[in-house]
Image (cartoon, rainbow, N blue to C red):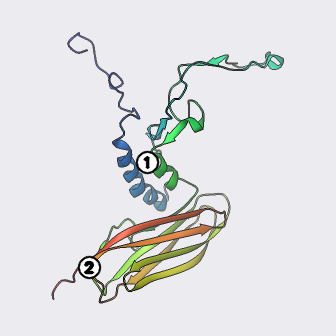
Amino acid sequence: QLAAGQGWHRWDYPHQVGSSEFDERHPVFALYLADNWPAFRTWGLSAISPWEFGHYWKPRAGLDRGRRNLPVDWARRQRPGLSADYVEGRYERMDLAFEREDWVPTVAAQALLRFNRPLLAWLAGKPGAFTSKDHLFAPTETVEKQLVLINNSRERVSGDAHWSLELPAGTLTGQQHVSLAPGGQERIPLRLALPAALAPGEYEMTASVQFDTGETQSDSLRIQVVVAARP
């Protein structure tokens, strides 16, 4: 186009920048959402805009993009306002075109749905620094994390929280009942002491919360146990 003296825009061939055809972006979006969205909400931000959310869903295979005639309500025809006869040439975004079942969520959409719902439970960093990513520990040290619960619904919600760290010699566990007011937040400190004989390696901490709404959420993180430094 440039050789022909024509300009080139970001929405020109082969794909516009916002195209959902760039599949390699979706795992990156998902990692970003999983790593930042819970922190944004824990900080108490009143609004967050997932600006590119429309790219997180892809049209299903075999979708009929043709013209669709709309039924005419002749009995109520003489009323103010527009009365469309058909739909054609849609702007393809999951909230603007076709039916909801016509859209397939990518891993980015799944991450957004996971971390943007009214209730949220996630494993965060240690008390006083919930965004910390401490993951290297030596035997006899204490793993400090938090289980953060957020209620952005309009009703009081309660639930039962459980957490565990599976080790070769046995599983370290804990549990607590919580009650969250509308707009409330609970941060449960987790302190798990590692045994002196623990072998170096990677271990997984898991947590789950069963809310009285019937919803259950779970989260996990991994820690690496290394040989203690010589004094």
Relative to 180, residue 169 above or below: below
Q: Is residue 29 left or right of residue 54?
A: left
In the rendering, at what x and y percent does residue 131 appear? 38, 65
**Dot 2, how many residues are within 10 Å of its Cα: few (below 14), some (14-19), or many (20+)?**
some
Please state, as top left, top right, bottom left or bottom right, where the C terminus lies in the image.
bottom left
Residue under the image location 43 percent in, 39 percent down = 52
Closest to the observer, 193 or 188: 193
Question: Can residue 220 be seen at all in this image of the molecule?
Answer: yes
In the rendering, at what x and y percent does residue 25 appear? 35, 42
Which element type, helix, strand or loop, lies under badge 1?
A: helix
In the rendering, at what x and y percent does residue 164 appear? 46, 77
Please state, as top left, top right, bottom left or bottom right, where the N terminus lies in the image.
top left
Which element type, helix, strand or loop, lies under badge 2?
A: loop
- Tell me the number on the disc at residue 178: none
Q: Is residue 194 left or right of residue 147?
A: left
Specify the farthest residue to the front: 62
Q: Amino acid at mark 2?
A: Pro
- Tell me the number on the disc at residue 200: 2
Residue under the image location 56 percent in, 69 percent down = 209
Residue under the image location 44 percent in, 56 percent down = 40
Q: Are the residues flagged by discs 2 and 1 in contact, CB closer than 8 Å?
A: no
Q: Quadrant of residue 210?
A: bottom right
Specify the farthest residue to the top: 4
Q: Amino acid at mark 1?
A: Val
Question: Can residue 46 be seen at all in this image of the molecule?
Answer: no
Q: Which residue is mark 1?
A: 107
Relative to 92, residue 35 above or below: below
Q: Is residue 155 left or right of residue 40?
A: right
Q: Quadrant of residue 19?
A: top left
Relative to 103, residue 109 above or below: below
Relative to 137, residue 85 above or below: above
In the rendering, at what x and y percent does residue 87 appear? 61, 20
